[in-house]
């Protein structure tokens, strides 16, 4: 896998919409965004596609790239994989089959619930933890953004990643196998479409971690599918085909703590929101927790229901999920029905030291000292006016050669003030000079030109 594939990301900048404000740099959890020359820039090596910048950009300049529903026309047979969080987008939903049948009505040939695969993964997780209890706690790998953050920031936690495929991948594998058996079509004629709540799962489909290649062909946003489904939904249950194959455990994965609840254990920690997740990861690295078997981390507030590609408020969606639970059995999918599934990863996640300053540990250590020295020279206000989120981030950019000290507005003011004083001193010297003024005039012109250049650069 080359560098562009390894750090592929689905969150992009719309330069035309970007106004150069600094809201995004303050909210990015990995400090992947800088603002220079009036435009934001996303560093692909740092970005984990959590989508937080999409939420907080007031000008809608951060966008998620995903596939169009029109893509279903490019396959002979298509299967929809609705995420568990999709059901919480609808008001007063009491029967999941209403939504699933709407997929068939809108043009898909088949539907397989990701929540059904989630129940299978819950079974596999319980078994794995039981067999490897001495290696606990294990960190859930269901959220791609969390896995990517661990890959670049927490190398000591890589062995704690649960080496099982996420439910969406298991669902895609089952859906493809069923479609091939039913139709006899070759794989390339079958389109597996995941209906996603977030951009991180778009990235997973294109550049997965834990498997060499994902069985997902296309990823469509919930917000694009939602209005189409509404047109095809019917509440006449006599006209519905029985498609639903999951219960509370599977659909509960859409909310924070839902995955942990499916493990039927009290020795777990569930956390939602990327900033809270970072704190938990740091505490895990410092071994501050004792007795845990499982750690569930969700990048989005509220869990997957809080994804940037959904339409409902995450807290309202959580309430809707709990209401839907009243009408569901505990579980419907059973592992004995899918004996041939391989749940384990086929490739382990390796550490990517993208934040390392030098080419070696020794060089990085020396440069860290330089960063500390530069940081001490900066005002420490973390105002973001330089285009970096913090003074320390600016210091790191300076060490990398991507910025200068004068990018700090306060340092720049000091620099201009010193230049002005020197110009004043030269002017005074010229007035007192009794000889030729050619050399002094040349020096004065050079200082004025330097001052003008710096001011013009700042204006840009």
Image: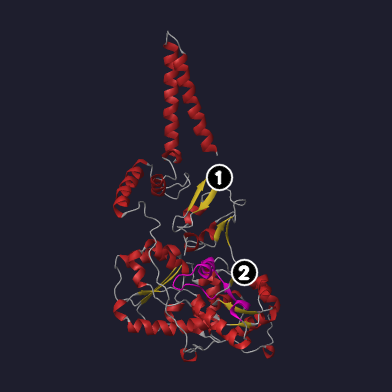
Vertical relation: 186 (above or below) 435: below
Vertical relation: 13 (above or below) 421: below
Query: Is 223 or 176 nearer to us in this picture?
Result: 176
Quadrant of the rendering where the C terminus is positioned: top right
Dot 2 surroundings within 10 Å: few (below 14), some, or many (20 or more)? some
| Farthest residue, direction top | 434
- Specify the color scheme: secondary structure
- Stretch of the chain drawn in magenta: 186-215
- Determine if the magenta segment contains residue 192: yes
Q: CA distance from mark 1 to mark 2?
A: 30 Å
- Residue 95 is at least partly visible in this image: no
Q: Earlier in the sequence, mark 1 or mark 2?
A: 1
Residue at (41% x, 40% y) in the render: 405
- The label shown at residue 374 is none
Say which residue label 1 marks: 38
Left or right: where 222 falls relative to 382: right
Residue 452 image position (x, y, % from top left) = 52, 29
- Determine if the magenta segment contains residue 114: no
Dot 1 surroundings within 10 Å: few (below 14), some, or many (20 or more)? some
Quarter occupied by residue 239: bottom right
Residue 155 image position (x, y, % from top left) = 35, 64
Quarter occupied by residue 84: bottom right
Quarter occupied by residue 293: bottom left
Vertical relation: 373 (above or below) 183: above
Residue at (36% x, 69% y) in the render: 158
Residue 173 image position (x, y, % from top left) = 52, 80
- The label shown at residue 223 is 2
Badge 2 marks a residue whose secondary structure is helix
């Amino acid at each position: 896998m080359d560098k562009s594939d390894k750090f592929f990301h689905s969150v992009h900048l719309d330069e035309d919409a970007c106004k150069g404000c600094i809201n995004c740099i303050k909210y990015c959890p990995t400090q992947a965004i800088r603002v220079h020359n009036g435009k934001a820039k996303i560093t692909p090596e740092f970005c984990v596609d959590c989508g937080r910048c999409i939420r907080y950009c007031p000008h809608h300049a951060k966008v998620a790239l995903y596939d169009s529903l029109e893509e279903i026309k490019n396959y002979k047979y298509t299967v929809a994989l609705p995420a568990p969080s999709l059901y919480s987008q609808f008001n007063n939903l009491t029967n999941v089959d209403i939504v699933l049948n709407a997929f068939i009505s809108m043009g898909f040939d088949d539907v397989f619930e990701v929540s059904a695969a989630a129940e299978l993964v819950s079974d596999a997780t319980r078994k794995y933890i039981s067999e490897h209890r001495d290696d606990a706690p294990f960190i859930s790998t269901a959220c791609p953004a969390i896995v990517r953050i661990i890959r670049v920031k927490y190398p000591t936690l890589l062995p704690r990643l649960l080496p099982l495929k996420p439910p969406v991948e298991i669902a895609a594998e089952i859906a493809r196998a069923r479609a091939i058996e039913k139709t006899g079509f070759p794989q390339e004629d079958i389109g597996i479409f995941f209906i996603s709540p977030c951009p991180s799962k778009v990235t997973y489909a294109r550049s997965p971690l834990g498997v060499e290649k994902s069985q997902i062909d296309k990823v469509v946003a919930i917000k694009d599918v939602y209005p189409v489904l509404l047109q095809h939904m019917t509440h006449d249950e006599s006209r519905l085909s029985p498609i639903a194959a999951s219960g509370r455990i599977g659909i509960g994965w859409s909310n924070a703590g839902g995955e942990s609840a499916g493990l039927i254990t009290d020795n777990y920690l569930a956390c939602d929101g990327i900033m809270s997740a970072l704190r938990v990861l740091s505490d895990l690295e410092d071994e501050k927790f004792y007795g845990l078997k499982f750690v569930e981390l969700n990048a989005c507030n509220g869990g997957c229901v809080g994804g940037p590609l959904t339409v409902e408020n995450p807290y309202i969606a959580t309430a809707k999920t709990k209401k839907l639970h009243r009408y569901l059995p505990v579980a419907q999918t059973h592992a004995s029905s899918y004996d041939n599934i391989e749940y384990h990863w086929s490739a382990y996640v390796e550490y990517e030291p993208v934040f390392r300053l030098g080419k070696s540990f020794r060089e990085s250590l020396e440069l860290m000292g330089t960063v500390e020295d530069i940081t001490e020279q900066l005002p420490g206000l973390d105002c973001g006016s330089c285009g970096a989120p913090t003074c320390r981030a600016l210091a790191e950019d300076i060490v990398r050669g991507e910025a200068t000290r004068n990018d700090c507005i306060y340092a720049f003011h000091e620099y201009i003030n010193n230049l002005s004083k020197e110009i004043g001193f030269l002017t005074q010297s010229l007035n007192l000079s009794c000889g030729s003024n050619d050399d002094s005039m040349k020096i004065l012109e050079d200082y004025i030109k330097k001052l003008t250049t710096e001011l013009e650069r700042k204006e840009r």
